[in-house]
Every structure is written in C-alpha cells, then in structure tokens.
Image: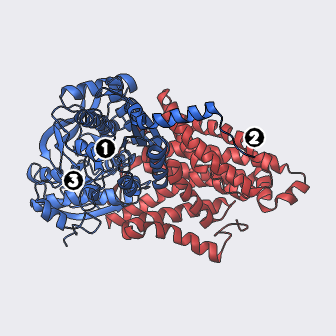
Amino acid sequence: MARTVDRRKFLWGTAMAAALPWAPAVAQSAPVRIGLLTVKTGPLAQGGIQMEQGITVFLKQKNNTLAGRKVELISADTGGNPAGAKTKAQELIERDHVDFVVGPLAAFELLAITDYIQQAKVPMMSLAAADDMTQRKPNPYFARASATSSQCNQPLGDYAAKEMKLKRMATISEDFAYGYEQCGGFQKVFEDNGGRIVKKLWTPIATPDYTPYLAQISDVDGVWNGFAGSNPIKFNQQYAELGLKPKYPVMGGWTAYDDALLKSFGDEAIGAISAAWYSSDLDTPSNKRFVEDMVRDYGNIPGGYAAGCYINGMCIEAALEKTGGKTEDKQKLIEALRAVSLTDSPRGAFRFDHLGNVVGNIFIRRIERKNGKLVNTILKTYPEVGQFFTYDEKQFLAQPVYSREFPPLKS
Amino acid sequence: MSLWLLLAVNSVTLGGLLFLLSAGFSLIFGLMRIPNLTHGSFFMLGAYLGTSFLALGLNLWLAALASAAAMAAIGGGIERLLLRRLGGQELAQVLVTLGLSFMIADFCLMQWGGDPIPIDTPAGLRGALPILIITFPTYRLVIVIIAVVVAAALWVMLERTRLGAMIRAGVDDAPMARVTGIRVSRLFTIVFCLGAALAGFAGVIGGPILSVYPGLDADMLPLALIVVILGGTGSLLGALLGSFIIGFLYNFGQALFPELAYIILFLPMLVILLIRPQGLFGRHAP
C-alpha cells in the first residue's frame, strides 16, 4: 500500500521541522529537574525518608524556584540495593532527563552507578561516604557536601587523644567498608597523637546480640563505635545493660549518634561523645529556618540525612545562580557546583576541595538531657576540616584506603 | 575466665529467645510441611504492635500478651484466607508466605515509620545480678525463665492433651490422621495461630534487647530456620535443643572466630542436612 502525503500533512511536517532548531529555547523555560535517588522501603528507609524531607523543605522555602527557574523534584526509590540504584539512575537520566542527581544513600549504591554517571555526565551529589569517591578514584561529575567516612572520625581521634587524654581504646564497628573507613580515620589520628588501639571488633551488619563482642572489651580507657542505621539503638542498650558504660566512655561517628536518632535513645546514650558534620542545635540563621520547618512539616528534629539533602539543594541553587540558570553545559554546571562556597548553611560555612569533597565544620558533641529531652550539645568545633584532616594530600593519598587491615593493629 | 562464663550465660539467654521464636516455626513446618517465611515478619509485626500497646500504657507483659493475641488472629486469618486455598501446593504456599513477608515489612514501615523504636526494660528488672564472678543483666535471665515456662506448657499441651495427640498424629502422618477422623485442616489453623502468637510474643519480649526496626524480620528468620533444621521439624525437643546449640555457637563463634561468624552458624546446618536430613530430633525429612 502506497503512503501518500497530502498537502496539509506536508505543511504540518515542514512547520514542525522548522521549529526543531528552536527546541532548546523551549526547553530553557522548562523546569530544572532534580532527580532524588533515595530509599523508601526496606531497612535503609529511615535515612532515605529523611533525605526526601530535607530537600522538600528546601524547595518549599524557595517556592520551587531556584535562580529564576522553576524546579521539579523527581523522587525514585532504589530499594536500598545496587541493582535498584542503577535502574533508577538510568530512569532519571534517560527518561526524565534530570539536570542533577541527588543521592543515593549508601556507598554500595553509589559505587554501582559512579561509572554510569561519569558517562552520562550528570552532576551528582550523594551523602554516601565512600572515601575513594573523592580520593583515589575520583569522579569528575561528583560533589559531596556531607563528609567522607573518615572525615568526622579523624578530628574525633584528635579529640580523644588530646582533650579527653585517653590512652588505650577498643573499636567496634560493622564489618563493611563504611565501618573500616570510619575506624581507620579514628585509629590513624588517635595513634598519631599518642593513643593506642588495643582491640578492633567487627560485627556483621545484622547482629541481634552484641554481647559476644562486648564481653571481649576490657582494660581500656574508652570505646569507639562506628554503627549506622538502627544498630546504634541496640548497641547502646546492650552496652549499658552489660554495665560497660560507667567503666569505658563511649564515642562514635555521626551515624552512631545522629540527631534524628535522639528520640529513639534513652538514658543509656547520655554522655556519648560523637563527631558530626551537622548538628541541629548549631546557631546559624539558615539552620534555624531549616530546623523550624522540619519540625513544623514533619515533627522531627533533623539529622544528617535531612540536612545533607537540604544543603545539596543550597549548592544546586548557588551553582544555578553562577550559570545564570543554564543547565545545558554539564561541564560548566559541575564546575559551578564545585566552586560553590557558602558562608551560611545549616552546617555553617563550607566549600569544596579540588576533588569535589566538602571542607567545613566538624562538631564534637555530647548527649545530654535538657528539659526532659536528649540533645547533642556541641563541646568543640573543628573548623575547615577537609578529608585529609591535617595531613598532606600527597602523603595521604599514597597510603592505602582505610580498610580492615589498615592501619594495622599494633601488637 | 569471666569472659567464658559471661558468654555461656548469654548463650543460654539467646537460646531462650530463639526457642520462643522457633517453637511455632517448627510446629508449622512439621505439620504443614512448609517453611513459613512470614515467621520473621510475625516476630517483627508482633514487636511493633507491642510498642503501640506499650504506648497505650500497658506494661511489657500485658503488651506481649495482647500482641500475641493480635498475632494469633492475624496468623489464623492468613491460614484460613490464603494458605487454605492453596492446600497441597507446597511451593505456592511458600511463595505466598514470602510475598506476605514483604507486604508486612512495607506495612510496618508505613505504619510505624523507619526510625528504630526501643522497648524499655521493665523498671524492676533493669539492674544486673551477680553470678559467681560476673554480673549479668537481670532481664536476660528472666527471658530464660519465660522460655522454660513456655517450653513446659507446650510440652504438656503436646504430650498430655487430646489436641496435642492430634497434632502429633498430624505431624507423623497427616493423611492417616484424616482417615481416623481428625480434622487436620483445623489443626493447621490452630498451629498457625499458635506459631504466630509465639512469634509475636517473642518479638515484644525480645524488644528490650533487640529494639524494633525495619529489617528485624530478615535478621530473625534465618535464625529460626537454622534452629529448626538443626533440631528437626515438628519436634519441640528439637527446637529447644536447636535453640541452645545455636545460642552457644553464636556466642562462642563470634567471640572466638569473628571472621567466621556466619560459617560457624550455618556449617552445622549443612552437615545436618547432609547426614541427617530429618534433623537431630525430627520425625521426617523436610
């Protein structure tokens, strides 16, 4: 059957073809699209839901308009696994044509999509902490406004050795990369300042009972832990139950004593010291606005997951202001994103280093009960902390990434 | 020395909790011939319901009993409305229980949120008791007592009552039991209610140690599976001994060979499956 083209069809087709070159101009007025890779189902959902709340609060404050352009948030649930992260990243980029990717949550999700993001050339801001994403295997389209796994724990090692004057410590952490990198950062700095790690314990991620591990802790000045998710609740309950709390002061990274966990903790957590890149009681104008709106909209004191995504939103706004709202040139967009330097954010002032990782405040806090509620009180602020802490970048990168074996346990 | 004693006492308490979890699982497995993959979800859902009962002002024990009652109703509903319709199709039944476990997990997330919820230890049991040269948390010892009481009650029920005799007959040979006039399908419902109730009860009782969080179901289900495969399906004694064996393996394995924690847990299961598939005390192979 022959296909005929009548005059109307011909004219219509020609007109459409003529309009094509103008399509980008049409797209310019289309909204900027932010794709959020988060986790809303399964065991990681707690952090994932807070991530979405954080960026939603930010966009609401900005009336969904950044640098004069409308913004659309497209949220995707990865299910908290690498395959899901890959599928959803492809959907966001190829179907929804997002201009930025915010997320994913977990390091193993991030590692599953980093090559793809690099090929697709879409600027990505993740809270996932895998050190090498901004160290030995950097991704040019990646920026991290939260922290590497070891970034908070390095100053904590300094604090434990110099201010708390602890000499011998045991560490306990989950048996996977996030645990190793946190522990390595703590051990390195603690030992470089005269301390000594005498026991390192690694627990499977799903550990119903920590007693077999805790029973091995003796003859130390303190215990460091690197737990995350819901494990800190279990760990601190059992730590107190076994009577270790009065004997050995306990401290940990930001996921172990995050502000969002405070409502789940009881008296057993009082006195715990932690190092975090965000603290909800920080007195800055933007943090006040952020906390107020989080409490109003969700009834929650925000922790790092919500704050991280809120701050990512601020970075995207600042980058768009630099490019005049343009998103077409991805190279310029990531350059603008990494050049962002803010003086007022919920975590205070911060900027990025040349590898795309944040340089900013690290807060040392202690859990206290005030007016009947548990709060993290800031004891000390380490300003302008980068991922290499006080070390020289070249020397730092020459050593292996922190792992189960590095730094080794000195016998 | 005190380390070993502490581990030994803790092995017994973990065994007690595992017994509460897996006794129902074992009976369901023995009678209905299916591993009920919702069992971990029953444990978690029971624990979550317990937190809601606690929030209403009930004490821990009443909350645990209320939660057990609610779980019995839910378990009975699942057996009557879903599994019953797939009678005889074991694979389909297992798949239904698997699907249900995902649905329950998402329901819990929707209903109780993603934040871990702690369950407080009852005020009177918060301290620690001195045992020889160690001090041990009182509450954990109470769990052992509860487990022993429940085990004794179940034993009396199974060995000394008419219902128990019928269940034993059903476990041994369901078609034959039917022929003699026992309504095996009703036994299925009863055992399923009982199993769900025990799991829910264990979830609340275990709360002060484990707390309640998304993923608790997936943490507990494999433990119930190993206990029952080790001890043998449909056997109360098997579940009891299996629980204590796993309690000891778990504690000493993780303390002595932390790198091999999972191997030490699962290796005995593999060996048992190979050389004695019916389990230590099981009446027939799964």
Question: Horizontal and vertical percent for residue B27?
Answer: 69, 55
Q: Residues within 10 Å of mark 3 (few under 14, many from 20)?
A: many
SS assignment at label 3:
loop
Dot in front, 2 or 3: 3
Q: Which mark is residue B81?
A: 2
- Pointer 1 chain: A
Along the line of sight, the residue nearer the viewer: A86 or A177: A86
Left or right placement of residue B84 versus residue A185 in this view: right
Q: Residues within 10 Å of mark 1 (few under 14, many from 20)?
A: few
The answer to which quarter of the image holds residue A309 is top left
Question: Horizontal and vertical percent for residue B101?
Answer: 60, 47
The answer to whether one can see residue B270 in this image is yes
Image colour for chain A is: blue
Q: How many marks?
A: 3
Is A363 located above or below residue B7 in the figure? above
Residue at the far front: name it.
A7
Q: Earlier in the sequence, mark 3 or mark 1?
A: 1
The reply to whether label 2 and label 3 mark residues of one chain is no
Distance of label 2 from label 3 (alpha carbons): 58 Å
The reply to whether label 2 and label 1 mark residues of one chain is no
Q: What is the three-letter code of the residue carrying label 2?
A: Leu
Image colour for chain B is: red
Q: What is the three-letter code of the residue carrying label 3?
A: Leu
The answer to whether one can see residue A372 in this image is no
Dot in front, 3 or 1: 1
Which residue is at a point 42% across and 58% down the rendered structure image?
Answer: B10
Residue on which disc 3 sits: A355
Distance of label 2 from label 1 (alpha carbons): 58 Å
